[in-house]
Amino acid sequence: MTNPAIRAIKQIYSTLYGQEAKVADYVLRHPDIAAKMTVTELAERSHVSEATVMRFSKKAGFKGFYHLKISLARQSVLKQTITDDPNLSTVVRDLFKEKVADLGWTQQVIDISVLQETLNQLKKSQMVYLFAAGNTNNLAAYASYLFNQLGVKAISTPLPEAQLNLAYQMRPTDFCLLLSDSGGTKLILDIAEICNQNRIPMVALTSQDKSPLTQLARRVLLGVHRAPSALEIAASTRLPLIAILDLLVTLLAADDSGHYVQYGSEREGNLAQYKY
C-alpha cells in the first residue's frame, strides 16, 4: 500500500518549482530516512533552504514539515510491530540493547564544557525556568521537582500560554533550560528567541544536533537515539534526555559544598510522612 505522503507528493510534483522539486526527489528516494530528519537536515540534504522545505510540505497538503514526517513514518510503524517476533524475551533484549546504545552515544557526544556551564548556572541563578512541549513536558516537571528538592529554585508549566508568560518574566539573573527532542517545536523556538532578545542565559537539551533550536541556542546538551529501533515508535522515547537531567541532579548532589545533598536530605525527611 502506497504511503499517503508519497501519494500526495506524486500528485503535486508537476506543480513544484525547481527548489521544491529537489526536496520532493529526496523524499521520494529516501522516505524512511526523511521521516527521521529535522527540517534543517532535509534542507541540507536537498541543498535548499528551510523555508523551501516548509513551502513544499504545505504544497503537499500538510500543515508543516512535522505533519509530513508523521505521515511518512506511519507506514514503517505499521510494518514493524513487536508481534513480528514471537519470542518476547528476544524483543526485550533487543530493545534494552538499543537503549543502552543510545546512552553510550549520548555519553560520547556530550559537551563537558556546556555541562559545566549548566551546573554553574544552576548554582548561581535566582530562578531556573524549564520549558518543554508535548510529551517532553513531563521531563520539565520531573527536572523541576528534583531541582527544587536540592534547593535550586525551579519552575515549569505544561500550558503553552503560561509558558510564554513565564518566558517574559525571566531576567538575566535567571537561567533557562529548553527541552525539545525534535529541536523544531515552535513554542520552544519562540521562547529561545525571547531568551536571545532579553539576554537570558539558556541551554538547550535536544536529540537533534542540526535543528532550528540548535541554531538559536549557543549552548546545547545533546541526547542521542541513533540505534535503529526494532519498533520504530520506540525511538520517540526520551531516555537520553532523562539521563542528562539525572546527570545534572547527581552532579549537584555531589557538589563539594555538601549544600545540595544536605538540603535534599532534609526535604526527603519532611516528605517521609507521606510514605510507609
Image (tube, rainbow, N blue to C red):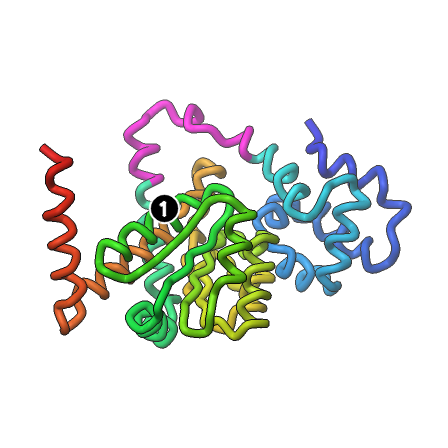
Quadrant housing the N terminus: top right
Residue 248 lies left or right of residue 237; in this view the side is: left
Does the segment drawn in magenta span residue 59?
no
Does the segment drawn in magenta span residue 92?
yes
Magenta span of residues: 77-95
- Residue that appears at 67% across and 64% down: 44
Q: Nearer the viewer, residue 90 or 135?
A: 135
Q: Nearer the viewer, residue 186 or 268?
A: 268
Q: State the image coordinates of residue 38 (x, y, percent, origin top left).
A: 60, 55
The tally of labels here is 1
Quadrant housing the C terminus: top left
Indicate the amino acid at tag 1: Glu
- Residue that appears at 47% across and 65% down: 170
Q: Which residue is mark 1?
A: 98
Q: From this viewpoint, which residue is outermost toward the right?
A: 15
Q: State the image coordinates of residue 136 (x, y, percent, origin top left).
A: 45, 46
Residue 193 lies left or right of residue 262; in this view the side is: right
Q: State the image coordinates of residue 54 (x, y, percent, origin top left).
A: 73, 53
Q: State the image coordinates of residue 62 (x, y, percent, origin top left).
A: 73, 41
Secondary structure mostly taken by the magenta-highlighted segment of the chain: helix
Work out whether 71 lies above or below 269. Answer: above
Q: Nearer the viewer, residue 246 or 174?
A: 174
Work out whether 240 lies above or below 128. Answer: above
Residue 61 lies left or right of residue 233; in this view the side is: right
Label 1: how many Cα within 10 Å (few below 14, some 14–19, many 20+): many
- Residue that appears at 16% across and 56% down: 264
Q: Secondary structure at mark 1?
A: helix
Quarter of the rendering containing residue 155? bottom left
- Residue that appears at 57% across and 65% down: 194
Quarter of the rendering containing residue 6? top right
